[in-house]
Image: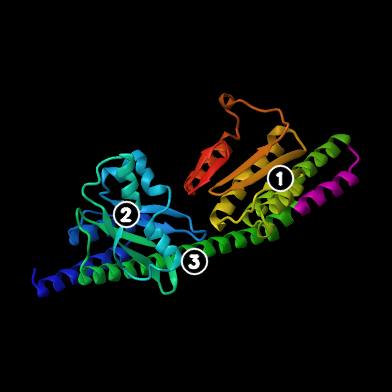
């Protein structure tokens, strides 16, 4: 290919990828599409992208045409263990596009006879970054290709910068949406407190005053019933306000659950094992699940005490809610089955695998 044609091809590649990055708002879909375009335009065989998380854990977020040796057992070789490109990324040696890195994962796959490598033994590695913020590593490879030209590396680096900028844009957009959601929840909580809660409190006082003023026992019983309903509705409203704006969550899950239990009239004992440093999304997810469980304990179990256990071990968080209530059967069609389903859906929507309440954080 002539130099002019190569330059034109690179510009078209960058234009196509830039359009994709600009149009997509789903991170995983965006990375998968861009990786496919990049591999096809550069006439390579395969590629994959690792996301490196704040605690140095990593995840395979996108891949294209991996050889069978790397897709063995649902891509297990790509999701476990370490490799040289990630080591260089973590210790700061991988600052720019690295020409060729022998693949430790492929070496192990050959050694363990996990499948055909399709002639792929090496790959180029490029860090994904936006300014000083780093997100992960882009790897590309082709059969029997043990070196990349300076032009190819320059193109890969340019694409990696574009990807890093797009990732930053999506993260900022997600943060903005989360802040808008929190602001709306706070507004609703204020409105409910200032209007509905005050009306219910006034209704409760009015019913109590009317009960004291009347002489008829039947009418007294009616006002007493109205007072009781108003009290229960006020308690429900306070629980709803707590769900919209949990004041204690900034002090940790244990504190929040105990305060929420106090509001429901439950004594909640929380046992914590391990250091808890969860992302805001995961922490809120567990908080909402715990809220629903405590609501069920209050409404249906007929207990005044609940035990909670939160254990954290590396990639896992284990949360257990236990009471000595009357119990139920899943086949009975209890009204709170909707709550159990919503708990499951909430966990799944945050990419947490549910087995009881034993969850693997992805």
Q: Which residues are magenta?
A: 201-216
Q: Nearer the viewer, residue 243 or 187?
A: 243
Where is the N terminus found, in terms of image quarters?
Answer: bottom left
Residue 205 spot, x, y in % from top left: 82, 51
Q: Nearer the viewer, residue 135 or 207?
A: 135
The residue that label 3 is drawn on is 176
Indicate left or right for 207 with 159 as reference: right
Q: Is residue 209 above or below residue 132?
A: above
Disc on the earlier residue, 1 or 3 = 3
Residue at 81%, 51% in the rendered image: 206
Residue at 61%, 59% in the rendered image: 188
Residue at 74%, 44% in the rendered image: 268
Marks 2/1: CA–CA distance? 44 Å
Indicate left or right for 97 with 260 as reference: left
Disc on the earlier residue, 2 or 1 = 2
Disc on the earlier residue, 3 or 2 = 2
Marks 1/3: CA–CA distance? 34 Å
């Amino acid at each position: 290919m002539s130099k002019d044609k190569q330059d034109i091809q690179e510009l078209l590649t960058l234009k196509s990828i830039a359009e994709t990055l600009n149009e997509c708002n789903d991170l995983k879909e965006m990375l998968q599409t861009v990786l496919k375009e990049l591999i096809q335009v550069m006439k390579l065989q395969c590629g994959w992208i690792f996301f490196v998380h704040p605690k140095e854990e990593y995840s395979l977020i996108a891949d294209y045409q991996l050889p069978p040796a790397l897709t063995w057992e649902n891509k297990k070789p790509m999701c476990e263990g370490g490799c040289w490109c990630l080591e260089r990324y973590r210790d700061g040696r991988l600052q720019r596009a690295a020409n060729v890195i022998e693949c430790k994962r492929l070496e192990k796959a050959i050694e363990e006879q996990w499948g055909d490598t399709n002639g792929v033994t090496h790959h180029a590695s490029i860090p994904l970054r936006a300014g000083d913020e780093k997100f992960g590593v882009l790897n590309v490879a082709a059969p029997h290709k043990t070196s990349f030209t300076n032009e190819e590396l320059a193109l890969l680096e340019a694409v990696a910068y574009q990807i890093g900028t797009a990732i930053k844009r999506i993260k900022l957009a997600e943060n903005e949406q989360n802040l808008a959601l929190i602001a709306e929840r706070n507004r609703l909580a204020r409105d409910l407190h200032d209007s509905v809660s005050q009306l219910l409190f006034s209704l409760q006082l009015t019913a109590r005053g009317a009960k004291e003023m009347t002489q008829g026992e039947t009418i007294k019983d009616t006002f007493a019933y109205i007072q009781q309903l108003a009290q229960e509705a006020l308690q429900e409203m306070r629980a709803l306000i707590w769900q919209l704006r949990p004041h204690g969550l900034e002090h940790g899950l244990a504190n929040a659950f105990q305060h929420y239990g106090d509001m429901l009239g439950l004594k909640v004992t929380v046992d914590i094992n391990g250091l808890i440093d969860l992302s805001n999304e995961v922490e809120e997810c567990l908080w909402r699940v715990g809220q629903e469980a405590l609501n069920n304990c209050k409404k249906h179990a007929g207990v005044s005490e609940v035990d909670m256990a939160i254990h954290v071990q590396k990639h896992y968080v284990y949360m257990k809610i236990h009471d000595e209530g009357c119990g139920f059967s899943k086949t009975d069609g209890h009204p709170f089955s909707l709550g159990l389903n919503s708990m499951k859906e909430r966990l799944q929507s945050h990419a947490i695998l549910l087995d009881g309440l034993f969850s693997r954080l992805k």
